[in-house]
Image: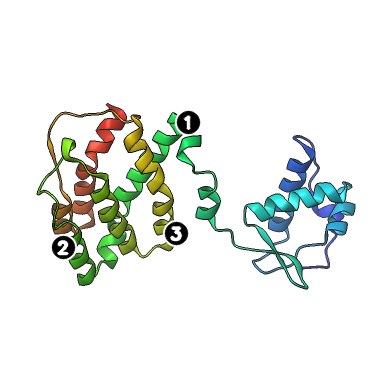
Amino acid sequence: MTGFDLKNSFKNIDTGSLVDRVEKNLIALFIDKNFKVGDSIPKELELSEALGVSRTVIREALLRLRMIGLIESKKHRGAVITSPDLVSILEKSMNPQMLDDATLKEIFEMRLSLEIGMADFIILRVTPEDIAELKQIVKSEPKKSQAHLFQIEHEIRFHGKLYDITGNETLKNFQKMLLPVFDYVHHSGLLKKQVLLKEFVSHSELIELIEQGSPEKLRNGMRNHLENHFSRLFD
C-alpha cells in the first residue's frame, strides 16, 4: 500500500520504551491505513525516516511483530501482513511450570467454562459416527464418575473428542494447548485433594444427553459432570 503521507500517519510518541512505542505506532499505522493480510508494509528505511528513529529500533520493533505473527517476510516482497496463529502465540508462554498458582487456576477455570459453553456446537454438529466413537471411549469406564474415581486419562480422551465434534479448529487447538496445564494442575496439589463423596453425571450419561439433542440439558449435564473440578477450585 502506497500513496499516503507516511510521516504524518503516526500518532505522537510519548510514553514507554522507544521500541515499545514504535511497535504500538506500527500496529496503529496498519489499522489506520486498513492494511489487509498479504499487503506489503513500508521498508525499514521509510519507517525509520518517518518516525525519526534508527533502523535498529525499527528492526527490533518489526521483529516483535514477526514473533507475534502479525508480519512475515516474503521473497521479493519484504515484510507483509499476516493472520496470526493466536493459539500458537499463547502456546509459547503456556508452560505450566512457569506460571504462578493464580494464573494456573484461572486457566483451569477458563477450560471448564469452555467445555460447558460449547454444548450448542456439539449438538449442532455431532454425527452418528461421533456418538459411536464416544461410546467406544467410555466402554471401560465406570457407570458413575465419582470424585475419588476421577481419572485424567478418561477425561482427556472423552473431552478431546467433544472438542473435535465442535468442528472449530481454533477451539480444538486451544484444547490441545490446555491439556498440559490441565494435567499439571491436577497433579500439582493446587486443587483441593478431595470433595465430599458424591456421584456426578458420567461420560455415558453425557452421551445420552447429546443423543437427546438439547443444548440446555447438555450444558446442565456438563456443569454437573465438572462440578468435581469446580468444587476443588472454589471450596
Tell me the amino acid under the disc marked 1: Asp
Which mark, residue 232? Answer: none
> Which label number is shown at residue 100?
1
Corner quadrant of residue 118:
bottom left
Q: Say which residue label 2 marks.
A: 211
Q: How is the image coloured?
A: rainbow
Give the left or right position of residue 90, taking residue 25 as reference.
left
Q: CA distance from mark 2 to mark 3?
A: 25 Å
Note whether residue 46 is visible: yes
Q: Residue at x 70, y 52 (%)?
A: 27
Q: Residue at x 49, y 42 (%)?
A: 95
Q: Marks 2 and 3: which is nearer the front?
A: 3
**Badge 2 or badge 3: first in the primary sequence:** 3
Q: Residue 168's spot in the image, x, y percent?
A: 39, 62
N-term mark: 2 or 1: 1
Label 2: which secondary element: helix
Q: Amino acid at mark 2?
A: Glu
Residue corresponding to mark 3: 170
Q: Nearer the viewer, mark 2 or mark 1?
A: 1
Identify the secondary structure beneath mark 3.
Answer: helix
> Which residue is at 44% across, 50% downward?
177
